[in-house]
Amino acid sequence: MRFKMIIVFAEEAMTDALMDAAREAGATGATVINHARGEGLKQSTTFFGLTLETQRDVLLFLVEQHRSRHILEEIARVGKFDEEPGTGIAFQIDVEDAVGVKHQISELSASVENEL
């Protein structure tokens, strides 16, 4: 079984909605890294020397490759990534090898075979 890693950078307030959307699309879980910081085309605004920026989270999804595009599209739709600038980004990369996913493989095998 082959996997892809979906990496999402999004506003902290959207994390739960993005997690729900990914699960409904076929993701089996995720790792969330809180309080990340990023900067886009426009620099963050400052007020009396303090930077005003919303907190960001990084979501990491290890997903079966046949489901990855659908999951990525659902994340983008719910997060409105292509509609509103600064809401976040998501991308996927190939995973060459993974360990610690044996229990997921047995769960995914039957459902993925049915989808193909």
Image (cartoon, grey):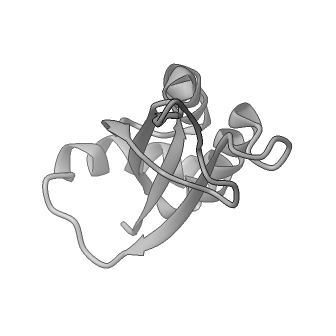
- The residue nearer to you, when weighing 84 against 1, is 84
- State the residue at coordinates (39%, 69%): 2
Against 114, is 51 above or below? above
Q: Splitting the image into 4 quarters, where does residue 34 fall?
A: top left
Q: Residue furthest bottom?
A: 96
Query: How many labels were placed on the picture?
Result: 0
From this viewpoint, is residue 30 visible? Answer: no
Q: Residue furthest right?
A: 83
Location of the C terminus (image quadrant)? bottom right
Against 31, is 15 above or below? above
- State the residue at coordinates (50%, 20%): 16
In percent of width and height, residue 91 lies at 57, 61
Q: Residue furthest left?
A: 100
In percent of width and height, residue 69 lies at 65, 58
Whether residue 35 sits left or right of residue 67 in the image: it is left
- The residue nearer to you, when weighing 68 against 105, is 68
Whether residue 61 sits left or right of residue 54 in the image: it is left
Location of the N terminus (image quadrant)? bottom left
In percent of width and height, residue 5 lies at 42, 60
- State the residue at coordinates (46%, 55%): 7
Whether residue 75 sits left or right of residue 85 in the image: it is left
Against 35, is 89 above or below? below
In percent of width and height, residue 52 lies at 54, 31
Against 79, is 8 above or below? below
From this viewpoint, is residue 93 visible? Answer: yes
- The residue nearer to you, when weighing 5 against 80, is 80
Whether residue 35 sits left or right of residue 83 in the image: it is left
- State the residue at coordinates (13%, 53%): 100
